[in-house]
Image (tube, rainbow, N blue to C red):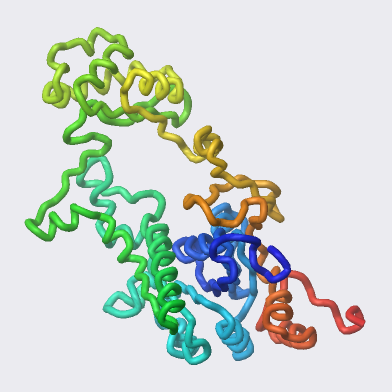
Amino acid sequence: MNKSGYVKGGSLSGLRVLDLTRVWAGPLATRIFGDFGAQIIKISDPRTPVANTNGVNNKLNRNKLSLGLRLDKDSGKGIFRDLVAISDVVIENFRPRVMRNLSLAYDQLKAINHDIVMCSMPGFGMEGPYSEYPAYGTTAEAIAGVPSLIGYEPSVPMPTGIAYGDPISGLHAIGAVLASLRNRDIAGGGQFIDVALAAGPVITTGEFLVASSADSYEREVYGNKHTHQSPHGAYKAAGDDNWIAISVTNDPEWMSLRSVADDDRLSDPRFFEFEGRKQNEKLIDQVISEWVANREAVDLMNLLQNAGVPAGRVANSRQFLNDPHLAARDFFVWLDEQEFGPKQYEGQSIPGNYVDKSNWEPSHQMGQDSRYILEDILGYSDEQCHSLASEGSVAFNRELPTSDQRD
């Protein structure tokens, strides 16, 4: 970060965002703003600091300044209000009552800064019978019915494994905030945005929601199978947790697969057309499984693709980090973390206009930037910093020097 506290470059340089979020959805939204050059001030309660011993929090809190602040103390609220007065955006994902109880709701912040854009991301929205319930991404995808669309049999619905409600809601927050900022620049005045975590997955279920509302339709659970393609599935290749996905979409692709696999059992005339393959899918799957069992997934992928058969390796996280296509696109970034040294993370999926990755910073320790924020951004004196530290309103990453040391 340069001397002004903003990351160098990026299309959102000059934008200041106060980040009160935790876990995934909110931190993802503010991280994207930070990747594109906005100054993100991550505000954490010193009593419950964000854990930096896992990759999730570290990857979601890069390119952010860290302020340890007690909002339950009057002086802490005073600091937050001072920051609101000179900021563009406030993002939080508490339950609705929290900001109201702190006297930091939107109407109160708007009285400080007429142009402030505030985005709240509670589990179930600011109003309604569920509004005060806490929620995580897994809760959101469950209430939206997403697990009912996934799995291998109807009696065992399966969660996504990535808490789908979180990233979807984070991306929705990005779009809503940017639209509000554009409106502010055109018409003037801020805006309040209510992004309910549980609403995000609902609007991405597409035709299933519409079909159910029309005629009580219930989608069948097919696992890895497909209603109009066969064979279609993931098959265990050589090694531990190595899989190859194969999808035959038409008869010529089937002929190519049969030729490459070179197994007489696949020459059965019943398999020449889709209907016959679908009726005998278990037998075909068994033959394919035997054929791929002792072969490398990447070799199989290249062999099948070269023959015109849609196929791809099902990569796990470690294999993903070594993907040659993503490496050629300079997708990944190495960040030198204070506790763990260099670690590789995903970069920015939206190309162009983000900060050059050579200027990205790893997640800061809680309170690492408290002094800078108070003195350089807000203009607090050294004596004020010591007073705030002594009363516990602000946490500093390092102990402040005593008056003798300062002299």
What is the x, y in percent for residue 395? 69, 76
What is the x, y in percent for residue 196? 35, 70
On screen, residue 397 versus residue 44, left or right, reads right
On screen, residue 312 versus residue 377, left or right, reads left
Quarter of the image where one finds residue 403: bottom right
On screen, residue 327 versus residue 377, left or right, reads left
Q: Residue at x 59, y 75 (%)?
A: 45
Q: Which residue in the rendered view is the most extreme toward the left?
A: 215
Image position of 56 with respect to 43: above or below: above
Q: Residue at x 47, y 66 (%)?
A: 26
Q: Residue at x 25, y 57 (%)?
A: 145
Asked whether 394 or 209 is in front, the reply is: 209
Image position of 48 with respect to 157: above or below: below
Quarter of the image where one finds residue 2: bottom right
Quadrant in the picture for the C terminus: bottom right
What is the x, y in percent for residue 365? 67, 64
Quadrant in the picture for the N terminus: bottom right
On screen, residue 407 versus residue 304, left or right, reads right
Quarter of the image where one finds residue 197: bottom left
Q: Residue at x 58, y 66 (%)?
A: 13
Q: How many marks?
A: 0
Q: Which residue in the rendered view is the most extreme toward the front?
A: 186
Asked whether 355 or 84 is in front, the reply is: 355
Asked whether 329 or 362 is in front, the reply is: 329
Image position of 299 with respect to 2: above or below: above
